[in-house]
Image (cartoon, rainbow, N blue to C red):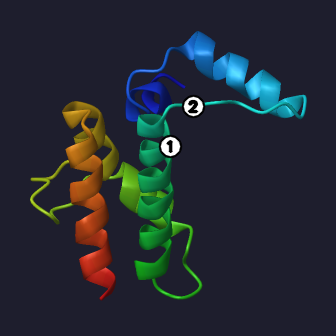
Amino acid sequence: MDDLGTLLGGVSRRTLTGWQAKVNNGETVEVSRDMMDRISLLLGIHKALSLITPAGHESMANEWFQKPIDLMGLQGRSIKRYLLEQGSMEALYYIRRNLDAMRG
């Protein structure tokens, strides 16, 4: 959960746990515009990874997010590691644009 908090811009574990409890109770969670943009980019990255995996092997999207790759200038880091190290909105946009370009 700590990684998710980092990807969302520095959200604490306590906040994430609180949000999860609210959602589980059918309550709404209000987040900032920055947070919505980050969520949108992460969902777009997931979708793009799913679309570029071979048909019938969509589960590879998660592997490609987690495992080191030599694409997009990541220099052998995983997409996840790159995003965690950079921690910026620009890094999310960079990965999203590159994955979109890969799918054409």
Please provide percent x and percent y for residue 63: 44, 58
Q: What residue type is labelled 2?
A: Val
Q: In this view, does 1 lie above or below 83?
A: above
Q: Name the residue under label 2.
A: 31
Q: Quick check: 102 left or right of 44?
A: left
Q: Is mark 1 on a helix, strand or loop?
A: helix
Sort mark 2 into few (<14), some (14-19) or many (20+) by Cα contacts within 10 Å.
few
Looking at marks 2 and 1 on the same chain, the residue that comes earlier in the sequence is marked by 2
- CA distance separating discs 2 and 1: 7 Å
Q: Quick check: 14 left or right of 82?
A: right
Q: In this orientation, which residue lies closer to the viewer: 18 or 27?
A: 27
Q: Which residue is drawn at 9% across and 59% down?
A: 73
Quadrant of the image occupied by residue 86: top left
Dots 2, 1 in contact, CB < 8 A = yes
Q: Which mark is residue 79?
A: none
Q: In this view, does 8 lie above or below 93?
A: above
Q: Name the residue under label 1.
A: 36
Q: Residue at x 70, y 24 (%)?
A: 19
Q: Is residue 51 above or below residue 92?
A: below
Q: In this orientation, which residue lies closer to the viewer: 30 or 66?
A: 30
Q: How many labels does the image show?
A: 2
Q: Which amino acid does label 1 sit on?
A: Met
- Residue at the front extreme, as displayed: 33
Q: Residue at x 54, y 88 (%)?
A: 55
Quarter holding the N terminus? top right
Quarter holding the C terminus? bottom left
Residue 6 visible, this angle: yes
Q: Is mark 2 on a helix, strand or loop?
A: loop
Please provide percent x and percent y for residue 71: 17, 66
Quadrant of the image occupied by residue 41: bottom left
